[in-house]
Image (cartoon, rainbow, N blue to C red):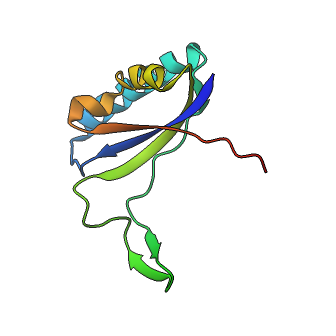
Amino acid sequence: MSEFIFLYRGKDWTTSPAEMQQRMQKWSAWMKELGAKGHIKDPGHPLERTGKTVEGRQKQVVDGPFAEAKDVIGGYTIIAAEDLAHAVELSKGCPILDAGGAVEVRPIMKLAL
């Protein structure tokens, strides 16, 4: 099994508390299903919407993580899957897709340090 990261991309949705609770229940159920099948390596965490970006040789500090982007990375999960195709298939159950978001699936490269 190889490791992959799911990066959750979405827009800044404003929802009612009831809608937020429904979304969280769907996320919880999906994560429990992946965990029960042995795919969760690190459940990850949601990311704050604020931050800084350090760019280039001058090490310029810019407010906000990609403030000009139409969507933001809202969190991540590290999973185990047979290969990239398997990881992509696992990502298709993510609740963010129902809300118009996206899951970026990337292989994690192993470095010998």
Say above or below: 35 vs 70: above
Percent x, y of residue 84 = 47, 27
What residue is shown at x 26% (from left), y 60% (from top)?
69
The residue at 50%/82% (across/down) is 59
Residue, far front? 112
Picture mark count: 0
**Residue 28 image point, x, y percent:** 44, 26
Instruction: Give whichever of 37, 26 is nearer the camera.
Output: 37
Residue that protrudes farthest toward the top in the picture: 37
- Give how far across and how far down residue 100 sits, in percent: 20, 36
- Locate the N terminus by quadrant: top right
Q: With respect to residue 22, does 102 lie above or below?
A: below
Question: Looking at the image, which residue is at 46% across and 19% down?
Answer: 86
Q: Residue furthest bottom?
A: 58
Depicted 62 relative to depicted 28: above or below: below
Near-viewer residue (58 or 5): 58
Taking 64 as reference, is 47 left or right? right
Q: Residue furthest right?
A: 113
Determine the residue positioned at 56% across, 13% down.
Answer: 37
**Residue 38 placed where, x, y %?**
61, 17
